[in-house]
Image (cartoon, rainbow, N blue to C red):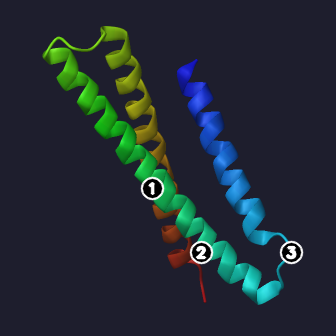
Amino acid sequence: MVSSALAATRYAAAASVASSAVGGEDGGTAQTSASASFGRALESALAETMRSLKEADSKAMQAVAGAADITEVVSAVARAELALQTTIAIRDRVIQAYQDVMRMPI
């Protein structure tokens, strides 16, 4: 249940960034703004992934010290795992798209 809620939250954030980037601008500026917004969305997603990984690490260290509940640790690790899997999937799709573009005949 946590993973689907996290995925829905990330999708909503990406959709709001995309819709705000394109709305109300002219052709050339909209393209540049959309590219910049896409870059910001990627940076934000990577920062969120790093934050969840650090949180999971912190919770695990607290559990080793006996200061954290095991359910909190498991939840943090599951969120971090989902975020990392999402980041890897996006990376793989970007690489595949780049390779497809490079194979296109000129």
Query: Callout 2: few (<14), some (14-19), or many (20+) C-alpha neighbours within 10 Å?
Result: few
Callout 1: 10 Å neighbours few (<14), some, many (20+)?
Answer: few
Disc 1, SS: helix
Residue indicated by mark 3: 24
Choose mark 1 or mark 2, whichever is in front: 2
Q: Is residue 54 above or below residue 99?
A: above
Residue 62: image x %, image y %? 20, 21
Q: From the image, which quarter does the C terminus lie in?
A: bottom right
Few, some or many residues within 10 Å of mark 3 (<14, 14–19, 20+): few
Amino acid type, label 1: Arg
Q: Which mark is residue 41?
A: none
Q: Which residue is mark 1?
A: 91
Residue linked to disc 2: 36
Residue 79, position as x, y percentages in the image: 44, 29
Question: Which corner quadrant holds the N terminus?
Answer: top right
Q: Secondary structure at mark 2?
A: helix
Q: Residue at x 86, y 75 (%)?
A: 24
Disc with the residue nearer the chain's start (3 vs 2) = 3
* Residue 98 appearing in the image: yes
